[in-house]
Each structure stands twice: as structure tokens, then as C-alpha cells.
Image (cartoon, helix red, strand yellow):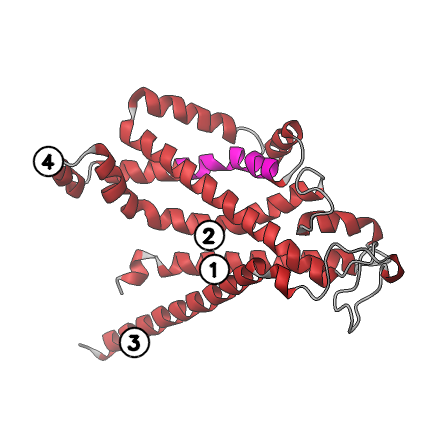
Amino acid sequence: MSEEKKITVREQKIKKNHTRAKLIFFLVLAVILLLIAVFAEYLCPYDPYVQNLAQAQQPPSMAHPLGTDRYGRDMLSRVIIGSTTSIFATLLLVAIITVVGTAIGMICGWCGGKVDTVLMRIFDVFLAFPGLVFALAVAGVLGGGVQNAIIALGAISWPKFARLSRGLTLAQKDSSYLMAARLSGSSTSRLLFKHILPNIAGPILVTSVLDIGTMMMELAGLSFLGLGVKPPMAEWGSMISDGRVMLQTAPWMVLAPGGAIFITVMIFNLLGDTVRDYMDPKQRNK
């Protein structure tokens, strides 16, 4: 092996190890966020729902590191307890649209014909409307609440995964290994779930992780507009909405939940980028 090739191989190994280290780092941060959301009730220094008007709108201090809101509730406690709703609602939404969209897309790609044509026209109808505007309309019809917000965003988000899985299924449908599986007598369900799904799961997983940040922002947006979580439940979007009228006099009421959204979205976006790099076939084969 020439010296230049040795240098190239060494650089490739360094890059691969660097990507793996980044993946572990961001996975650890994501797990920490999930643990905070799971044990939020025990991590809050104060009861996040108890009002104390004598402590209203106090700036950050040793007693209240993120200050208090207009009702004297500790902002740090509300940000921590709000992580449960914000993070788990987002993960539930992403899981739903991933499973539903992937299943429909695989059916379209596998069946073809009229089934594919009809479902593709349905995709086009959903994609013809601006996503958030359509979600606002659906949420407005269904009424407020986190469940209705998830339904509204799920209704406009699943076609993306359906189109992706359809294209990937079409690419796998006529492959030689799948023809061999057919000749061996495998059933349709076995072909779809044992052969096609494992081979298309990588790009779908990457898209799901990258979509977490987007869905969190949109859920917060619906709550900000009063179409998501209802008071007094703590949720980062609704907390920003509560504090926006006092942005000049008590900016910490907006900065605290806004900072929580920023950090969470950034971690999941960076995790998604790193997962994409790690699962890149060019990277794995080096």
C-alpha cells in the first residue's frame, strides 16, 4: 500500500471515529433530556402550579434562578415540568406520522395500480396546503388541547414519510434478493416486514430524528396561538404566550421557555445530522 493510500485510510478512520464520538455525545444529551422529562416531577424545586402573588414577576435570583411569572410561580419548575408535555407530545407525534406514513407508502409502492394512484392524489391534496396553516384550521375545528394539536399536525405531516417510503419501496421491489424471496414462497407480509422494511428503515429513521425539532416548534406554535395545551398545564409554547405581553418588563418569562425550546431543538437536530452522517453508506463502507 502506497504512502498516500495509507494517509487516506488513516483520515477515513479518524473521520469515522469522530462521527461515532459525536453520535454518542448527542445521544447522551438526548437521553438526559428524556430523563429530565420522565423525572420532572421530582426535579422541580417548587410546585410549578402553586400561585404566590407576593412573589409575582421576580427577576432571576438565587431562590428562583429563572425568576417567577405573573402569578408568582417558579419559572425553573415550570420549564422542567413543561418538558414532559413538550418532549413526549413531540415524540408521540413523530412516532405516529412515521408509522402511519411509512405503512401507507409501503402499500403504495408494493401494490401500485389504482391503489397507488388514489393514495398519491390524497398526498397531493395534503401537500397542496401550507402545512402550519392547514394544522391551524384542523386544530381550530377540533378545539384546543394537546391531543387535538397532535392530530392536527399528524394530519399534515404523514405524507412526507409516505412519499419517502413509497420511493424506497419501489427501489427495492424489483431487486434480485426480493425476487429470490418470492421464489422461496415468502408471503406478502413477510416480504414487506422482513425484507423491505429493514432495508428502508435507515433513511426513514434519519428523517424521523430530523423531524423532531420541526414538530416541537409547530406544537409550540399551536400552543402559543391557544390551540394546543390549555392553562394551567405547563408547556413551553403556552408559557411563551403567557409571557409575551410582559416581554419588556419581565423578559425572563419568555426567555426561559424559549431557551428550553432552542436547546432541545438544537440537540435533536444535531443528533439527526449525526445519525445521517453515521448511516451514510459511504461512511460505513470505509
Residue at (68% x, 37% y) in the render: 227
* In the displayed structure image, the side of residue 71 where residue 16 appears, left or right: left
Name the spot of residue 68 as percent of width and height, x first: 80, 61
Residue at (22% x, 38% y) in the render: 190
Hey, what amino acid is under mark 4? Leu
Using the image, determine if residue 56 lies above or below residue 195: below
Residue at (52% x, 37% y) in the render: 154
Hey, what amino acid is under mark 3? Arg
Badge number at residue 10: 3
Badge number at residue 209: 2
Task: Tell me the element at label 3.
Answer: helix
Hey, what amino acid is under mark 1? Leu
CB of mark 1 within 8 Å of CB of mark 2?
yes
Name the spot of residue 186 as percent of width and height, x first: 16, 36
Name the spot of residue 189 as percent of width and height, x first: 25, 35
Neighbour tally class for label 3: few under 14, some 14-19, many 20 plus, Cα within 10 Å: few
Using the image, determine if residue 32 lies above or below residue 205: below
Of circles 3 and 1, which is in front?
1
Q: Which residue corresponds to mark 1?
A: 271
Whether 102 is among the magenta residues is no
Please tell me which of labels 2 and 4 falls first in the chain: 4
Quadrant containing the C terminus is bottom left
Q: Which residues are magenta?
A: 147-162
Neighbour tally class for label 1: few under 14, some 14-19, many 20 plus, Cα within 10 Å: many
Task: Tell me the element at label 4.
Answer: helix
Badge number at residue 211: none
